[in-house]
Image (spheres, helix red, strand yellow):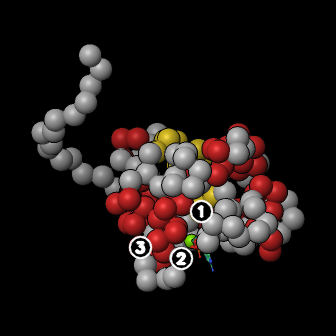
Amino acid sequence: MPQKTLVLLKPEALKWGIAGDVIKELSKTKLRLVGVKLVKVSEELAKKHYKAHEGKPFFEILVRHITGHFHKENVLALVYAGENSIKIVRDKAGATDPSKAEQNTIRAKFGKPKMEIGVFENVVHTSATPEEAEAEIKLWFRSEELTEKVFETKKISVCVEREAWK
Ligand code: ADP
Ligand code: MG
């Protein structure tokens, strides 16, 4: 199975109107897009996503940032598949601090060079390891929301009440 990776276009990417430019940059990698979803991020999802950063001084700001507190916007989640996709996408994203990101990377081109809100407004999140990618993709997407069965699945029975069109 090809390697999978999660990319999040953070709220500033939508606020600044650069989502299309970022996706264009990502498409240069020639990786295959297998999932896309616009997400209104809850505090619960944010805390799960950033669990590894729990306890760090900027953790609460990270959560407020990704839930759209600063930019009043949602997050666009994407899943890419292809050989070595994790490294390819991280190289394309560039260093965490946009002021230190390599030329021609997404964070160098579009990130805010100066930290103003207490975390870097670095436009994208990208998975760092295969374990992180699997956990993150399973956190952000249901299996049926991806165009391919990228991980093993099982059948479950559910009975839920949900909103539907009238
Ligand atoms: P990356 O997004 O490059 O994988 P990390 O996983 O280390 O970086 O951090 C997650 C996010 O937390 C970063 O994208 C950035 O927004 C923020 N962050 C990381 N380190 C710091 C820091 N020292 N000060 C403020 N914000 C930080
Ligand atoms: Mg990370």
In the image, is 148 to the left or to the right of 109? left
Q: Residue at x 67, y 57 (%)?
A: 123
The quadrant holding residue 136 is: bottom left
The residue under label 3 is 51
Instruction: Identify which amino acid the numbered label 2 is placed on.
Output: Phe
Q: Residue at x 59, y 50 (%)?
A: 71
Is disc 1's CB within 8 Å of ligand 1? yes
Q: Which residue is mark 2?
A: 58
Viewer-side residue, 159 vs 53: 53
Q: Nearer the viewer, residue 123 or 128?
A: 123
Is residue 87 something that shows in the picture?
A: no
Between the residue at mark 3 and the residue at mark 1, the CA separation in whole angstroms equals 15 Å
Residue in the foreground of this view, choosing between 6 and 54: 54
Q: Which percent across, then down, holds residue 12?
A: 64, 52
The residue depicted at 61 percent of the width and 72 percent of the height is: 118
Q: Nearer the viewer, residue 83 or 113?
A: 113
Mark 3: which amino acid?
Lys
Task: Please say whether residue 145 is visible from this viewpoint.
Answer: yes
Q: What residue sits right under mark 1 in the picture?
A: 126
| Badge 2 or badge 1: first in the primary sequence | 2
Q: Nearer the viewer, mark 3 or mark 1?
A: 3
Residue 88 on image: x %, y %? 69, 62
Quarter in which the C terminus is drawn: top left
* Amino acid found under the numbered disc labelled 1: Thr
Q: Residues within 10 Å of mark 1 (few under 14, many from 20)?
A: many
